[in-house]
Amino acid sequence: MRGAWHDDRVTSEPHRNSGSGTDGTPPVSSIPLTDDRNGNGSVGGQSIGDLVKDASSHVSTLVRAEIELARAEITSEVKKGLKGSVFFIAALTVLMFSLFYLFFALAELLYDIGLYRSAAFGIVFLLMLLTAGLLAFLGWRKVRKIRAPQRTISSMKETAAALKPRGSAEHSELPDQAEVNRLTGGPTSR
């Protein structure tokens, strides 16, 4: 076996100990990043084709892990949103159905106490609006806790930075096409 790179699901150390993320998200697989070189630091006898194959395999695994992380974070945020929407549904239920008979009876009670009938029904209507407003406020408090998937965003930024070219100074050390053809046994210009 050449190196320790593999595509097996491995849970990162913080998640292995707690069973879930520190912010309530489920554990997400991480990629074990180890060096595929021999003990002396050289790329022992690998062809450029093998190196390209390994690099593309590593990038593929990295992208899959990024997608899994995004899915886990977004799922967690959607669940928070659904929990908050329950309060909105309750508010709409109270507003639409209004517990008609109870509120009607309350208005009649106020009328019997001595208020004008229109004033009694107006007071009951305001009470219904306050109840709906309170439930909507509770739903809003739950929904505003939804956050952007910060771990995914930072991980994607790190990946993008790692895949960007480093600059022209480093590229000058790369072999030209003739050297690559000579090393790989590819077409030569004769």
Image (cartoon, rainbow, N blue to C red):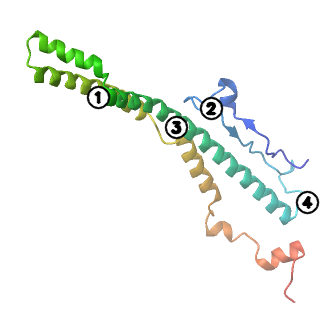
The answer to whether 69 appears left or right of 43 in the picture is left
Give the spatial CA distance, label 3 vs label 2. Answer: 13 Å
Any part of residue 176 in sight: yes
Q: Which mark is residue 45?
A: 4
Give the spatial CA distance, label 1 vs label 4. Answer: 72 Å
> Looking at the picture, which amino acid does disc 3 mark?
Val
Are the residues flagged by discs 3 and 1 in contact, CB closer than 8 Å? no
Tell me the element at label 1.
helix
Given residues 5 and 167, the one toward you in this image is 5
Q: Nearer the N terminus, badge 3 or badge 1?
A: 3
Give the spatial CA distance, label 3 vs label 4. Answer: 49 Å
The residue pinned by badge 2 equals 26
Residue in the image at 69% along x and 34% along y: 12
Given residues 148 and 127, the one toward you in this image is 127
Residue in the image at 17% along x and 12% along y: 109
The answer to whether 54 appears left or right of 110 in the picture is right
Bin the neighbour count of mark 1 within 10 Å (Cα to Cα): few under 14, some 14-19, many 20 and up. some
Tell me the element at label 2.
loop
Q: Nearer the N terminus, badge 1 or badge 4?
A: 4
Q: Is residue 84 above or below residue 5?
A: above
Q: Quadrant of residue 129?
A: top left
> Looking at the picture, which amino acid does disc 1 mark?
Gly
Q: Which mark is residue 133?
A: 1
